[in-house]
Each structure stands twice: as C-alpha cells, then as structure tokens.
Image (cartoon, helix red, strand yellow):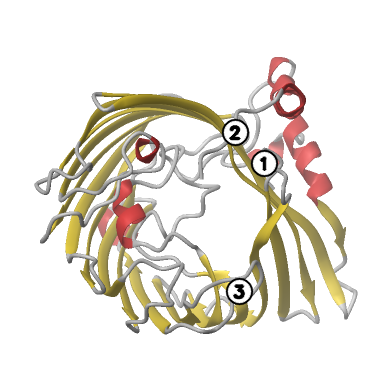
Amino acid sequence: MKKQKLNTAQLALVAGITAMLIAPIQTQGQTTAKIDATPPAADAASKSPSIYDQIWRYAEWYRSDGNPVIQSFKFTGRFQLDYAHVDADQGDHDEWNIRRFRLGAKATLFKDFTVHAEADLNPQEPRPFYQKLTDCYLAWGRSKELVVTVGKQSAGFTLDGMTSSKELIALDRGNLANNLWFPEEYFPGVSASGRPGRWRYFLGLFTSGSSNPEFGSFDGGVFSLATVGYDFAKELHAKKAELAVNCVYQEKDENNSFTRRLNDVGSVNFNYDKGRWGFRADVSGGLGYLGQSDLWGAMVMPYYHLTDKLQAVARYTYITSDEVNGIRLARYENEVVSGRGDEYNEVYLGLNYYFYGHKLKIQTGVQYAEMRDRANDGGKYSGWAWTTGLRIGW
C-alpha cells in the first residue's frame, strides 16, 4: 500500500520527538552507550549516566528482584521514520513514510516467566490506527540454555530476517531477505531456543494461514524453522564470528497468505565483528510452489567505524530465479515497478550515526539496482534510490 505524505500535524509530531531526543547531544559529551561493533572505550562504570541513560530509564516502570510475583515491567516499542527518493529509468517516486510504530510492554513474572505484547500502529494513515499484534507470547526459561515460547513471536531466518529492525546496520532489510524470508515476521506458534556456550539453536513450529490482526485464522498450512549456529570468535580472534544455518519447511497450501510460496528454504550466514570493522554475509535459496520459481541469492555487507559514533556500510546483493518473474523488487523500488524479474543486482553505500547505540540513530544510504526481466512483462528496473531514516527503540 502506498503511504500518504505526512500532514503538518504529523510532521510537527515527528520533529518534536526528534528534537527532544537528539537535542541533548549539543550539551552532553560522549554518551556511555556503544554499538555492539564499536572498539572498546573507557570504563563506562566510571562515568555518570548520560542524558540518554536518564531518558531511557523511564521505559522501565518497575523493578524489584525481591518481589516473588513480578520482578520487572518495561515499556517496549519502536518508532522508525523514512524519507525515500527513487530515480529510475522507469519512473520516479518520493515519500515520507512512518515505517514502523509499535508500542507494548514486557513483564518478568515468578522469576522464570516473561510476558510480552506489542501492537503495530499507523499514525500516518490512522483508519484504522491499530494494525495488528506483533509479539504476544509467554516464555519460560531458567537459563540461557533453554527458553520455551508459546504465542505470536518472531520467526526469523536469513541474516537480515534474524536481525531485529531496531538493529539493522543498513537502513532496511536487503532484497535477499525480502524474497526468501517471509513478508510477515510474527506468527503464532511454539519454539525452543537457547545459547549453550558458544552454540545457539532455535526450533519452532508455526501456523501460516490467512491472518486477522491478532492470531490468524489457522486455515492454512504450518511451517517448521530450525537454526543452528556456532561462534568462532575465539579461534578467529574477533568479538564475534558466528556461523549459522537456517532450514525451513512449509506445507504447500494456497491459504498461506503471509509467507512466501516457498516450501523449502535454506540459508547459510556469517556475522564477523572485529571491533572497528567487520562484515556480514548470507547465501540463501528456496524451492517454490504454486507459480513461484525456485531462486537463490547472496549478500555481503562490510562495515567500518569511522568514529565511535559514525559507521560506514556497504552491501552487494545478487538474486537469480530459475524461471521468469521469480524475483520481487525492494520496498521503495516496488513503488516504481510492481512487476517481477529473474535476476537482481544491487549496490548500497550508507552512513549511520549512533546518538545512543541502536536505541537512537540516524541512517542514510544510496543504492543502485538493476533487475532483468526476460519475460518483458513489466519487471525490468534500473535506477538509483536514496533513503534516510530516524530509528528510535525502547
């Protein structure tokens, strides 16, 4: 759905939120928060809390380890605003877009249980204002080795698909995830996950039928998701060097409305963090059904920290499909060309400025993409896009 332009009141609201959160940078020195891949800084414990620390503390409404019933209650959510401009041979497009706005709460109960519920809202096109539930689950876990989760939860696979939209280092998920991951992130189901030592695993079973805003109608098939990963940081002398494998099997059902029509998907991805620099890479493929072609692709994304707060990111993406019309364009490219093609190439260059780690950042990026369309039925694309976004998470 094409987003409407923000009206004056909406722009004023966005400007107010931005000014409130970013203005303290003019009076505050270096904050104590660092992004995960930033080189080690001075001992944060020796510094007084920054203005951002003080603001974000208000997200935690209650904490008491001595209370046997409720140990914590937190306000959760995210606000993400984009400006996008596309200049392609096939046409132009530009828009302001409240990309995501979510509000919710998370509570720890009886020491071992977590309850989390969050709603997706749309103040830009507020009819309806409430869109759907995203997270709505109950989790149990006494340690990081085993956590069992029941309810509506994230089912992430591929490198970008496993990364929260709060923590992406490119402005948005790449087109490899857009084609092979599912367009809906949250599904009702049950999962078991954990991080024993340097291993990580995730095993889940989810329903993928047509959806209502809450838990869906359960009229489609189911899909299973398995992830196994291992961190080679010690062997490679890095902060992180995690190799992961994702495997997805989905029942072939025409009522699978919020998944891609791929019954088998596999992904091998690697996340390497040396401190000041690093890279992420992903090779993924899927077998299609009901008219969706088999396809596979690869993505590599190096990054470098120019300062503790300024990060440069590059990305190259390649996708190919066995048959014509197997590949979709990315979010804003699709506003110019809605057809599909059979080979996609993209180069992205971006800068990120972290005011308060991933909790408050501005990201901007320029990309050039081409898509081949052997069928010559409206999927050919060649053009530039520039997108800038404000990302706030709590």
Q: Is residue 57 above or below residue 9?
A: below
On the image, the x and y values in percent for residue 176 come to: 29, 52
Front-most of residues 189 and 159:
189
Q: Secondary structure at mark 2?
A: loop
Which residue type carries mark 1? Glu
Q: What residue sits 42% from the left and 84% below the top?
A: 221
Q: Which residue is mark 1?
A: 125
Q: What residue sits 40% from the left and 63% below the top?
A: 182
Q: Which residue is mark 3?
A: 152
Which residue type carries mark 2? Gln
Q: Secondary structure at mark 3?
A: strand
Q: What residue sits 46% from the left and 67% below the top?
A: 258
Q: Earlier in the sequence, mark 1 or mark 2?
A: 2
Q: Is residue 374 above or below residue 73?
A: above
Image quadrant where residue 37 sits: top left
The alpha-carbon separation of the residues under discs 3 and 1 comes to: 25 Å
Which residue type carries mark 3? Lys
Q: Is residue 28 above or below residue 311?
A: above
Q: Are marks 1 and 2 in contact (CB under 8 Å)?
A: yes
Going by the image, does 384 lie left or right of 283?
A: right
Category of crowding for the residue at label 1, using alpha-carbon neighbours closer than 10 angstroms: few (below 14), some (14–19), many (at least 20): few
Q: Earlier in the sequence, mark 3 or mark 1?
A: 1
Q: Which residue is mark 2?
A: 4
